[in-house]
Image (cartoon, rainbow, N blue to C red):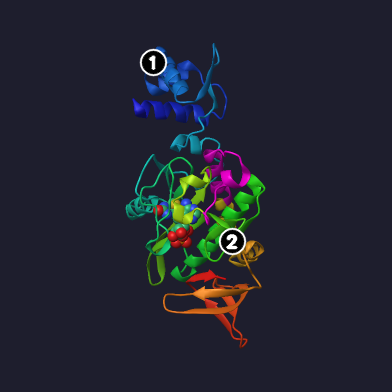
Amino acid sequence: MESTRNRLIELLETSDKQFVSGQLLSEKLKISRSAIWKHMKELEKDGYHVEGVSRKGYRIVKFPDKVSENTIQWGLRTDWLGKKIIHKTSTTTTQQIAHQVAQDNAEHGTIIIADEQTKGKGRMNRQWQSTKGKGIWMSIILRPDFLPVMAPQLTLLSATVLADVLAEHTALTPKIKWPNDILINDKKTAGILTEMQAEQDQIQYVVIGIGINVNQITEDFDKDIQDKATSLQIQTGNQWNIKDFIQHVLQSFENSYDSFMQNGFPDVKYKWESYGYRIGEYIKIKTLHKEWKAKFLGIAEDGALLTKTDNDEIKKIYSGEIEW
Ligand code: BT5
């Protein structure tokens, strides 16, 4: 039943808003025309708007707003990103599923997306709060053909994509806090977690985990982060359509990734710095064992954080946190 329904949606989808005759659908699906009609009624119940015109057939005029493999794919104009989508209503973390399917040879550009994560992950085993139906909790599997040392550049690239999409979609002014936080009005609205499986000179796959707070209200966040987390709803006062947002992220991600693969890092660096938070200021750098102050100059050609200490020493930082 479920697979007939998916095939039906697929057939209507590929016709790109043209009518598909009941006759053709019944031949392709090997079911009667009255069974087709029943399926259409079921689709309507799920929020699809199906138009049926005698002698012309059927077409979907609107997909439901809820997130599913079909609704994301409908109208998605990417070449390779999101051709395979795994959607879960609830899961522990989309990162874990991404690793599993990547080890089972999932293709470059596979997406795992969930309405809710019960064990959302931040970096260094920190927690990522992922309220049900109120944000984008998504992992992207990539199989880039470059050296593992270049993988951090993908985090910076992803951050510029999110900043671009937030700016285009909402007219807010996002900033990127090195390396992976997207801030709006100084509060965190999105985060990125890059994980990788690699040998010394070869990447097997990279998983880019993207979390974007979309429709939360302040009380949706735990008390301990209420003063530093924000969402688009809090910032704009509007509810946002999550499916539209996902499509925008995927389209923009594919464009930026393709141009990065063609032209290298300089464009990403330039864009990152245009969004960079507190560039030119004194910042506190914290690594596992040390903490010191330096001037934040920008991003180096290899993606490292570029700093200048008081005795004019230029230093590159590859991992850690920054504060002020
Ligand atoms: C991150 O870590 O910012 C990476 C977030 C990646 C989340 C995505 S969602 C899809 C995929 N599946 C996953 O399980 N993860 C990825 P980090 O820089 O370590 O920041 C974590 C810190 O941000 C926490 O310690 C909290 O202080 C704060 N935080 C937690 N949840 C938040 C939220 N929803 N919004 C803003 N801040 C949050």
The spot of residue 309 in percent (x, y) is 59, 83
| Relative horizontal placement of residue 271, taking residue 194 as reference (left or right) | right
Q: Residues within 10 Å of mark 2 (few under 14, many from 20)?
A: many
Q: Are marks 2 and 1 in contact (CB under 8 Å)?
A: no
Ligand 1 visible in quadrant: bottom left
Q: Earlier in the sequence, mark 2 or mark 1?
A: 1
Q: For the N terminus, which image quadrant?
A: top left
One can see residue 193 in this view: no
Stretch of the chain drawn in magenta? 227-252
Q: Is residue 248 above or below residue 154?
A: above
How many numbered discs?
2
Identify residue type, mark 1.
Answer: Ala
- The residue lying at 39 percent from left, 47 percent from top is 117
Q: Nearer the viewer, residue 205 or 221?
A: 221
- The residue lying at 59 percent from left, 61 percent from top is 176
Badge number at residue 176: 2
Judge whether residue 234 is colored magenta. Answer: yes
Q: Magenta segment, principal secondary structure?
A: helix
Judge whether residue 91 is colored magenta. Answer: no
Residue tagged 1? 35
